[in-house]
Image (tube, rainbow, N blue to C red):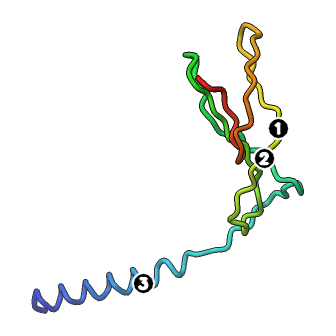
Amino acid sequence: MSKRKTCNSQIILVAIATITFPAGCIQKFLPTFSSPPTGYLVVEGIIGAGGGPAQVSLTRTTQVSDSSVSFESGASVQVEGNDSSVYRFADQGGGIYGIPN
């Protein structure tokens, strides 16, 4: 077999594998746990030890099929230091809480 035919055959095989492989591996994800009706509280943020600004975001989990984000507002957020000092975060709207610099 000529070198050109071998190269064309390899390209065709790669193209067929590329098209059919992803379609064969897609499976619907079904979590094995049940979420509470309110969802789980998710706390994300940055709190530095240097006394700079601190900010956290509070959201709630939603169903896997739901792509929306549920922001938690009206919460009371505070952090306690090793020396028992308390830092209260102010509600900045949209699920964001912070301590200004």
Total residue callouts: 3
Q: Is residue 37 left or right of residue 94?
A: right
Q: Are marks 2 and 3 in contact (CB under 8 Å)?
A: no
Q: Are marks 3 and 1 in contact (CB under 8 Å)?
A: no
Residue under circle 1? 75
- Rendered location of residue 13, percent (x, y): 32, 85
Q: Secondary structure at mark 3?
A: helix
Three-letter amino acid code of the residue under disc 2:
Glu
- Rendered location of residue 65, percent (x, y): 72, 69
Q: Is residue 50 left or right of residue 36?
A: left
Q: CA distance from mark 3 to mark 1?
A: 49 Å
Q: Secondary structure at mark 2?
A: loop
Q: Which mark is residue 72?
A: 2
Q: Are marks 1 and 2 in contact (CB under 8 Å)?
A: yes
Query: Which mark is first along the chain, 1 or 3?
Result: 3
Residue under circle 3? 19
Which residue lies at the image location 37% right of the left edge and 87% below the top edge? 16
Q: Nearer the viewer, residue 67 or 21?
A: 67
Q: CA distance from mark 1 to mark 2?
A: 7 Å
Three-letter amino acid code of the residue under disc 3:
Ile
Three-letter amino acid code of the residue under disc 1:
Ala
Which residue lies at the image location 75% right of the left edge and 62% below the top edge? 31
Report crowding for label 3: few under 14, some 14 to 19, many 20 or more residues within 10 A (C-alpha). Answer: few
Which residue lies at the image location 55% right of the left edge and 75% below the top edge? 25
Q: Nearer the viewer, residue 20 or 73?
A: 73
